[in-house]
Image: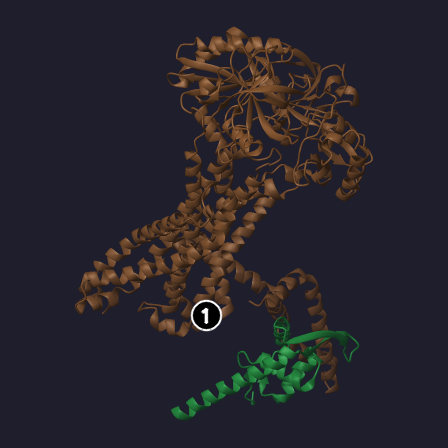
């Protein structure tokens, strides 16, 4: 049907009323004219009227015909096609089930994946006017982003003509009592106007008042909806209750609405109060988030900030190259790796949908081939080409609609299953739901499939020489349709090869990553995090006493070999980057400072290279010491020509305890240890300076315990030992070192397994497609095969003939797929670890796998061809 | 009835209308019907009303277009005229018709 033609009819349907009236007028005018003519011919008015009516014919009949022509037929045809489509699906339930299942899987997986893409990358943040939200940074170089200091933050905050609200956010953990035992909750320390930045109004209560982040304010707390529900049972009187954080009662002033803030790790928010001794321009540890005033552009803000930076040149003399930068908030929530992984997986799932469409198109074509006769008869009876295409399309439409609906259901199930797995990797603003946008995408996907899988085959079926197919249909071998099906299978094979290639590369990269030596003992080590509440451990001495007691307590648990305290775990993060200078040299450089206790190296089995490790005597009051890793030793030797660093003095900025600010300390290098991976395995080794916990105590710490037996078996003993030391101290995450390692590789594992699964599905579908085409060809060529066998061909010849056809399709598909891989795997580059995007082993693996799958798929039709009994076949057809 | 009147041959009414508009230029429904009857010299049994569904069909195909005008009785009526596509279609339809007629004629000659 020509689009214009269809549009006219649709329009006519809408304008039915007016057109009816117009017709009425037209008929009246007609009759009047006819009457006038008749009277002119000498008839009496009455006779003239009768004559006019007679020659006009049945008015009612004409009106109906007119209406038919205008509109109804179009709708009726559609309805008839839909009914016919359903009936024809119902006649062949196997075909219908396979088609709809394929479509449901393809559309479902795409829809689920799109909801992730949409929630993470496309949808505006779920806050009012999210484009006004920004992050503000200091920039050591124009490309780098660094946190800021308390005083500089306060300077920014004073720029009230550009910032409507500006807040810091700093993670914090606190112990609460639940059923008599301590539990650790995550929260955030924020400025009073934090919730204005997000434009979030509390469900009940009020957010922080302006003065509540000043020293001396009464302790208040805002809690999340989920905490309100889980801990307070949704008590409407919760605002009159207190939440005891680290034993100190905090008055609950608000409950946030459900939604984004329930996906955040934090469940409570407290005002961040800067103690007077914290006010400096040295400790760059705050990442402010702000809301611009309406109508202020990023450019204007940046200009203002540059002016401000210039005016602060005096106080920021130590950081003279640093600038200020303002970035939009939304992109800062999504890291590069996550963004790439999401696009990668989405690309893979789109390819799967393509293959699905190809398979469905193949099914439709195969069916079309058997229906050529029906089409030919209908064409001979006067059905127009357009009508035939419309009919075939409508049949595909029916399966696409059913497949789409089932696909939405599949997407729902998938989202349900994957949300808990991926939620931690996604930003807290990402709400994975089947909202109208996602449903719209499902509809678009279904339409795309309809066009790919429906339109091509129906054009093919109805445009091929219908008259000749009347003769041929009974005989078999429909040449051009078979060629098209082969082309489609080749395309499927090619896409699968690309996917398998990508998956193979990712798996190889993951394997490389797993082989990286972490530099520490991984098995039989269990780790736990905890936070010493400032109220219970107000001084560095109190913290040191805890470290001594806990190591002793843990060491005496049966099954434990050795225990230690460290600030950060291996593979997590080294902690702060700090400036270090060697005396006599002007140039400072960045090192990671990692406080550990004297038993850390032994527990984690990190061998000493030279000098000594950290020892029990390195306490407060004793000379400050540091042990450096090989990486730093190498740097010192190459940069400053220091061959043996042991004994040297270095100057490092070291953070203080709690609110005590950092200070520049002269420390003596007493030893060098072999490098451990302090951050994730794919990262290069960092330069690390280990300092004694006792000289630089920390409140947020990790306990590491090496065990003789299964580490989980000693957990109850460990908990008891911790309780003996401090009954109010909750243990945070309890993980074996193996789990820590797994989690550090999650960024690589998740996309790898998902792409791997999709590649597997793709290969399976391509094999199915190949099987379908071969099986169909063998069925259609039975007669030919029969004759050839009757004329002396052996089963071997028949087998090689069919196999050749399979292999030729595979070969062309592989070649196309390899070409595609060369073009596409480049996109993977940044996600690969020590594997080139054109790794020949991966390309070879993909070809071998696809060929194996293809040959397996060919086996059944080939053996059927070989088993053809010429007598039966020839008798059948005779 | 003494005269031998035939029905409008199936599918030819469109052709007759197109041809009429081609020769006579824009005209309203009644005039088209009358013109066809006149040319047929009363050999044709035409329900004048049946041209309206045909006109709507031709309009939807884009072969004719309409505009409003005044009839001789001072009523607002639709005037129909041929479009460019209509002119082309007329040529095709005429050619088709001639081919069919020639074919049928050949058959009749051969059979007799």
- Residue A850 % position (x, y): 36, 51
Secondary element type, mark 1? helix
Which image quadrant: the C terminus of chain A? bottom left
Horizontal and vertical percent position of residue A34:
71, 80
Is residue A405 something that shows in the picture? no
Q: Position of residue A331 (x, y in %)?
A: 64, 40
What residue appears at the point 50 percent right and 19 percent down from the top-left corner? A528
| Chain (brown) | A
- Left-right relation of A150 to A455: right
One can see residue A63 in this view: yes
Colour scheme of the rendered structure: by chain
Q: Nearer the viewer, residue A488 or B12?
A: A488
Subunit of label 1: A
Location of residue B92 with respect to A843 vertically, above or below: below
Residue nearer the viewer, A652 or A325: A652
Locate residue A466: give its quadrant: bottom left
Residue carrying label 1? A463
Say whether residue A846 is left or right of residue B35: left
Q: Colour of chain B?
A: green
User: In the depicted view, which residue is nearer to us: A268 or A327?
Assistant: A327
Q: Is residue A550 above or below residue A740?
A: above
Quadrant of the image occupied by residue A120: top right
Q: Position of residue B9 (x, y in %)?
A: 53, 81
């Amino acid at each position: 049907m020509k689009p214009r033609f269809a549009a006219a009819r649709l329009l006519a349907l809408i304008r039915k009323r007016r057109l009816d009236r117009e017709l009425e007028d037209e008929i009246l005018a007609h009759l009047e004219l006819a009457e006038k003519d008749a009277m002119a011919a000498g008839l009496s008015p009455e006779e003239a009227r009768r004559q006019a009516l007679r020659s006009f014919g049945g008015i009612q009949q004409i009106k109906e015909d007119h209406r038919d022509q205008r509109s109804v037929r179009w709708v009726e045809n559609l309805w008839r096609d839909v009914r016919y489509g359903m009936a024809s699906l119902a006649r062949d339930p196997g075909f219908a089930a396979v088609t709809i299942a394929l479509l449901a899987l393809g559309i479902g997986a795409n829809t689920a994946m799109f909801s992730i893409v949409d929630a993470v990358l496309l949808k505006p943040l779920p806050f009012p006017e999210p484009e006004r939200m920004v992050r503000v940074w200091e920039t050591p170089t124009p490309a780098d982003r660094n946190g800021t200091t308390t005083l500089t933050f306060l300077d920014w905050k004073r720029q009230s003509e550009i910032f409507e609200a500006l807040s810091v956010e700093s993670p914090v953990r606190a112990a609460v009592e639940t059923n008599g035992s301590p539990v650790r909750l995550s929260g955030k320390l924020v400025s009073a106007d934090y919730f204005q930045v997000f434009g979030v109004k509390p469900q009940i209560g009020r957010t922080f008042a302006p003065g509540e982040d000043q020293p001396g304010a009464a302790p208040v707390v805002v809690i999340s909806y989920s905490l309100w529900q889980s801990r307070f049972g949704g008590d409407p009187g919760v605002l009159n209750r207190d939440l005891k954080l680290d034993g100190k009662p905090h008055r609950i002033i608000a409950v946030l609405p459900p939604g984004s803030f329930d996906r955040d790790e934090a469940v409570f928010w407290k005002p961040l109060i800067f103690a007077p001794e914290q006010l400096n321009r040295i400790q760059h540890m705050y990442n402010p988030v702000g809301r611009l005033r309406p109508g202020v552009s990023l450019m204007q803000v940046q200009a203002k900030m540059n002016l401000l930076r210039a005016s602060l040149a005096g106080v920021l003399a130590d950081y003279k190259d640093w600038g200020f930068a303002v970035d939009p908030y939304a992109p800062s929530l999504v890291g590069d790796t996550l963004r790439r992984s999401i696009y990668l997986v989405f690309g893979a799932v789109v390819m799967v949908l393509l293959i699905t469409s190809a398979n469905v198109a193949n099914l439709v074509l195969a069916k079309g081939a058997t229906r050529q006769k029906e089409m030919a008869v209908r064409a001979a009876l006067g059905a127009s080409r357009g009508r035939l295409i419309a009919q075939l399309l409508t049949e595909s439409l029916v399966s696409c609609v059913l497949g789409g609906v089932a696909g939405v259901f599949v997407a729902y199930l998938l989202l349900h299953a994957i949300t808990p797995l991926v939620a931690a990797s996604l930003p807290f603003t990402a709400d994975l739901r089947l909202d109208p946008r996602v449903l719209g995408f499902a509809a678009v996907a279904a339409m795309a499939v309809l066009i790919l899988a429906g339109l091509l085959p129906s054009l093919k079926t109805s445009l091929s020489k219908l008259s000749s197919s009347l003769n041929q249909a009974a005989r078999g071998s429909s040449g051009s349709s078979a060629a098209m099906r082969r082309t489609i299978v080749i395309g499927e094979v090619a896409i699968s090869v690309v996917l398998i290639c990508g998956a193979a590369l990712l798996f190889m990269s993951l394997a490389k990553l797993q082989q990286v030596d972490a530099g520490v003992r991984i098995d039989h080590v269990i780790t736990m995090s905890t936070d010493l509440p400032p109220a219970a451990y107000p001084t560095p001495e109190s913290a040191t006493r805890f470290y001594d007691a806990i190591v002793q307590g843990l060491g005496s648990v049966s099954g434990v070999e050795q225990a230690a305290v460290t600030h950060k775990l291996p593979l997590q993060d080294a902690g702060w980057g700090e400036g270090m200078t060697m005396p006599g040299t002007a140039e400072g450089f960045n090192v990671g400072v990692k406080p550990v206790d004297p038993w850390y190296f032994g527990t984690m089995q990190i061998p000493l290279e030279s000098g000594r490790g950290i020892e029990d005597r390195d306490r407060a009051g004793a000379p400050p010491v540091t042990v450096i890793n090989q990486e730093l030793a190498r740097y010192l030797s190459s940069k400053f020509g220091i061959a043996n660093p042991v004994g040297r003095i270095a100057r490092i900025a070291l953070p203080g305890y709690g609110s005590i600010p950092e200070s520049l300390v002269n420390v003596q290098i007493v030893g060098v240890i072999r490098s451990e991976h302090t951050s994730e395995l794919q990262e290069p080794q960092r330069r690390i300076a280990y300092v004694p916990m006792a000289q630089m105590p920390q409140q947020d710490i990790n306990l590491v315990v090496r065990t003789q037996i299964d580490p989980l078996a000693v957990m109850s003993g460990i908990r008891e030992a911790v309780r003996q030391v401090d009954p109010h101290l909750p243990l945070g995450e309890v993980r074996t070192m193996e789990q820590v390692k797994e989690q550090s590789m999650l960024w690589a594992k998740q996309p790898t397994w998902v792409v791997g699964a999709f590649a597997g599905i793709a290969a399976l579908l391509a094999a199915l497609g190949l099987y379908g085409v071969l099986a169909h060809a063998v069925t259609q060529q039975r007669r030919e095969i029969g004759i050839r066998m009757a004329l002396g061909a052996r089963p071997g010849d028949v087998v090689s003939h069919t196999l050749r056809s399979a292999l030729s399709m595979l070969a062309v598909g592989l070649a196309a797929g390899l070409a595609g891989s060369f073009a596409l795997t480049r996109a993977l580059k940044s996600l690969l670890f020590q594997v080139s995007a054109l790794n020949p082993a991966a390309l070879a693996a993909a070809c071998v796998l696809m060929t194996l799958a293809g040959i397996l798929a060919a086996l059944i039709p080939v053996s059927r061809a070989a088993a053809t009994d010429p007598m039966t076949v020839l008798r059948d057809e005779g | 009835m003494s005269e031998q009147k035939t029905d409008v041959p199936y599918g030819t009414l469109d052709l007759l209308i197109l041809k009429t508009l081609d020769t006579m230029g824009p005209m309203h429904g009644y005039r088209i019907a009358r013109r066809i009857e006149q040319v047929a010299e009363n050999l044709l049994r035409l329900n004048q009303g049946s041209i309206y569904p045909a006109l709507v069909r031709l309009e939807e195909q884009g072969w004719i277009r309409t505009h409003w005008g005044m009839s001789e009785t001072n009523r607002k009526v639709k005037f129909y005229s041929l479009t460019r596509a209509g002119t082309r279609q007329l040529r095709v339809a005429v050619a088709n018709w001639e081919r069919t007629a020639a074919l049928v004629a050949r058959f009749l000659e051969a059979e007799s």
